[in-house]
Image (cartoon, rainbow, N blue to C red):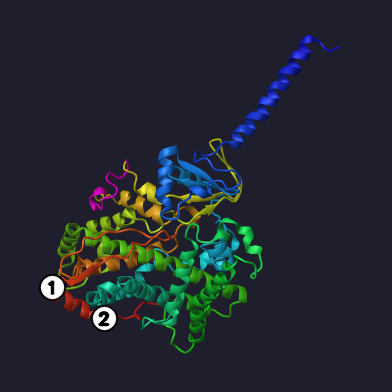
Amino acid sequence: MLSTSSIHFAFLSLILLAYSVFYRRFRRRLQFPGPSGLPFIGNVHQLPKREMWLEFSRWQKTYGGEAIQFQVLQQPAIVIHSTKLIKELLEKRAYIYSDRPKLVMAGELSGMERSFSMQNYGERWRNQRKLVAAVFAAGKVARYHSLQEGQARMLINNLISRPESLEWELKMQIGVIIIRLLYGYHIQKPDDPFLIAPLKHLEYFSEGTLPGGFLVDTFPQLKYLPTWFPGTGFHKTAQVWREAMNDACWNVYQWSKANLATGQTLQPNLFSAYLRDGQLSETQEAELVWSAYSVLAGGLDTNIAAAKVFFLAMVMHPEIQRRAQAEIDAVVGNERLPTINDRENLPYIRSIIAELFRWHAPGPLGFPRSTAEDDDYNGIFIKKGTTVFINVWHMLNDPEVYPSPETFNPDRYNNSEAEMKKVLDLNFGFGRRACVGVNFAMGTLYAIVLTTLATCDVLPGIDEDGKEIITEHGYTSTIISFPTPFKMRIRPRSPKALELLQAANISLGDCPEI
């Protein structure tokens, strides 16, 4: 017969075991705060179709914490609102937080998932990234300055007579820069198919990233339905997108490859640096094509969005524009046009650039990540496959960090390079997925900003009665967010400034070899 003490010991052990099991399960169920969802659908009904970053920011203020959590059907998602959490998860645990979620319409069905920007972290991703990383290394981008400066000057020349064509001119001139560098092809007319093809595909891709745009993104199982089944028109749409993407990726590559030996392919360019070393296997060739298109797709929209924010800010803040012009005049003078290298001596211009990215980040929610395995953060369970958003907009509009965040104010940095860097780091990614072309992209933006301010005044548009229009602005809800259309004028600051612009030697073949 068991003794009383043995029974007590067994009973106590049973209680401790039960508590331990319960405690572990309870801890495992802890999650970040967030809105309560409904059975089966989760929080689908609470997700807005416009400016999702604003709703996530409101949720953070309601529920608190470093992140908020919600559910779309059976898919968990978290939204990070803290730079501390970014460092803890996306940088220190990059091996978990470097995958991408599956985008059904914009990625899987349209074929864009082959781009390294949308692939999971792995060997294929590393190979594609490595192909372009060396070309855009910080020590090499200076050799592309003449190309960037030349197209910036052409941009402003064209906008003086056609300010209403701002968006198209940005697409044209920024497209010229990137396509020239990647493929060695010189775009000379606006309807060039090698420019039109990527612009068309990027419009499709942006449409595919709109919240609630396609039911198949909410219910991925629909992708298995046959094309004849009612309600599956997305299959035909995806096929159109896939064809547009293949045209954008492969046609210009085939031209570059075919004309390398004839000398028509301009040097330097990304493709020739690899093709001249010998024959590539079919797999290597595909990796090269996709790595180049990843840069083109990522660089075009981000640069265009940032440049549009610049023109919008100048229209709305003439006093900031005048102060920036005075700084350029004092440092550069009026006998030459500024160059990208002049930025080192222009602290107020650097502050304006940082404030552009703070005032409205081109990617307000970044590009979502996905967890490669289960994780535990301070007792909070983060399930494998959780979608991870980074609310860049919220962190850059936090009034405790940036007082009066709605105000465009370059003085808020007090010429602190460290404070400006914080803003840029939030915009250009973290950990293993940090933007590979950040130095090149910044060079293009500086060329546009410096050329514009040195030579022209950016003014509000005028109505039919000749009165200045009060500029109202909003932003698109796409994954790369652009200012909505606004009216403006571009006026040369002086006959001398116009003369310098018109005399600028715009040459696309002067870059030294890579």
- Mark closest to the chain's N terminus, 1 or 2: 1
**What kind of residue is marked 1?**
Ser
Residue 38 lies, with reference to residue 241, above or below; the image says: above
Q: State the image coordinates of residue 214 (x, y, percent, origin top left).
A: 53, 61
Residue visible at 44% across and 80% down in the picture: 194
Highlighted magenta segment, given as a residue range: 400-412
What whole-number distance in Å separates the C-alpha atoms at marks 1 and 2? 19 Å
Q: Which mark is residue 186?
A: none
Query: Is any part of residue 399 visible from this angle?
Result: yes
Disc 2 designates what residue? 505
Q: Is residue 407 magenta?
A: yes
Estimate how packed mark 1 is, as few (under 14), some (14 to 19) or many (20 or more) residues with alpha carbons within 10 Å. few
Q: State the image coordinates of residue 251 (x, y, percent, origin top left).
A: 51, 81
Q: Which mark is residue 494?
A: 1
Q: State the image coordinates of residue 65 (x, y, percent, origin top left).
A: 45, 38
Residue visible at 63% across and 29% down in the picture: 23
What is the quadrant of the C terminus in the image? bottom left
User: In this image, 385 relative to 471: left or right?
Assistant: right
What is the quadrant of the N terminus in the image? top right
Local secondary structure at mark 1: loop
Residue furthest bottom as drawn: 262
Please tell me whether the stretch drawn in magenta is mainly helix, strand or loop. loop
Local secondary structure at mark 2: loop
* Quadrant of the rendered image containing residue 348: bottom left
Q: Is residue 44 magenta?
A: no
Estimate how packed mark 2 is, as few (under 14), some (14 to 19) or many (20 or more) residues with alpha carbons within 10 Å. few
Residue 423 lies, with reference to residue 216, above or below; the image says: above
